[in-house]
Amino acid sequence: MAEPFPLEPSLWAATAPAAAPTPALRESVTADVCIVGAGYAGLSTALHLAERGIKAVVLEAKEPGFGGSGRNGGQVIPGLKFDPDELETMFGKDRGPRLVDFVGHTADVVWDLIDRHKMDVPNTRNGWIQSAISSAAVGPIESRAAQWQKRGAPVQVLDRMETAQHVGHSQYVASWIDRRGGVVQPLAYARGLARAALAAGAAVHGNTPATGLERQGGKWTVHTAQGATVTADRVVLATNGYTGDLWPHLRQTIIAANSFQVATKPLSDNVRKSILPGGQSTSDSRRIGLYYRLDHTGRFLLGGRGTMREPRQAEDWSHIETMMERMFPQLKGAGIDFRWGGRVALTRDHLPHLHEPAPGLLIDIGCMGRGVALQSALGRAMAAYIASGDPLALPLPLGKVSPLPFHGLNKLYFQAFVTWYRFLDRRDAAAA
């Protein structure tokens, strides 16, 4: 597997507070729970376990936040890809409403953690905007907003003029704003979770790749590249887009797609005030969606899908930069300070998956563009499940590990779909 694109060139690595020390594991230890992966899910699980007095050891191949948790756009978005009514139909009259209630409050978990642990995390909670690029996308957006309004969420539909006032250009037909959402500096947040977990009593070890997993005598042993082991009653795998082969066929259940991002140099006051003046983040209704925001240093950030291979040169981001200047002509010549990418875990049904393929082994995989809020909340739920043994503590049912058919060809199919969908998006936008 190709080495992930380095973390160092990202905007977030350049502007995050220093990381807490997380030395590599050098000696074998025992724990109640061993967690593999120090992203939002793993660190939130460790923190909430430690607060319950359950000893957790976290193993991370690089450093906390190195994967998607430190490379995403920092949008804190509640909900899932599916609307509330769809989720209730999919999951039934008992579990469905509980799932809707859970995903409707995932963003609350993020700000509760930041406030409660006094994390040094630049953040703004002024809402998230999802915009329609064509008239065909307006109906679904209005329906989505109405369904959340019915459940008491602070959301509002914006017409074309109102959308332009909020976003800073007139290319969208309409939008809805979800005031539960907002933005964070994502790597700062991951590092804040690590500090909180350490302060609560969890152990976090960076530069400690987990290389093997076995169960003997009712205990799990996690082997590491250094030779040290962790022996625990339970194991949690929370590796998402950077999942390897610790558990058979798990990697084949997802497409680990690249999300590419660029960030400009700090903008002048006049230009900065002309874009997202209310401080919201925005995603749009394209099949291959774009997302953008301003950060706390006054830079404009825009992200979208990239090539399946790892980026090699600045031209790999050219499609992102072209879209940036097409939407905001005032950014032409602003200059790009940072280009980076990260892997996101996409599942076939566009839902996060929870698995328990063996006694004491819990797996969380698939964030679907909602990782900051969703995985923070899932970490809390997984800790509650581990502590209680009650499956109802989990918002989703435990499912089987089911590899995608012909997984080796899925990346080719995915890239073909990306190309085709981009054509359709351009056509729809031109007709708006």
Image (cartoon, rainbow, N blue to C red):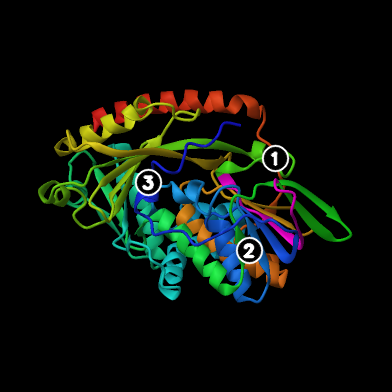
Q: Is residue 70 above or below residue 425?
A: below
Q: Nearer the viewer, mark 1 or mark 3?
A: 1
Residue 114 in the image: state x and y as whole percent: 42, 68
Q: CA distance from mark 1 to mark 2?
A: 22 Å
Q: Are marks 3 and 2 in contact (CB under 8 Å)?
A: no
Residue corresponding to mark 1: 245
Q: Amino acid at mark 1?
A: Asp
Residue 419 % position (x, y): 42, 24
Label 3, secondary structure: give it: helix
> In the image, is residue 104 above or below residue 353?
below
Which of the two residues, 53 or 283, is positioned nearer the viewer here? Answer: 53
Q: Secondary structure at mark 1?
A: loop
Q: Residue at the spot x=63%, y=59% of the render?
A: 58
Is residue 358 visible in the rendered structure shown here? no
Crowding near pointer 1: few (<14 within 10 Å), some, many (20+)? few
- Let me know if residue 233 is in the magenta part: yes
Label at residue 140: 3
Looking at the picture, which amino acid does disc 2 mark? Met
Q: Give SS at disc 2.
A: helix
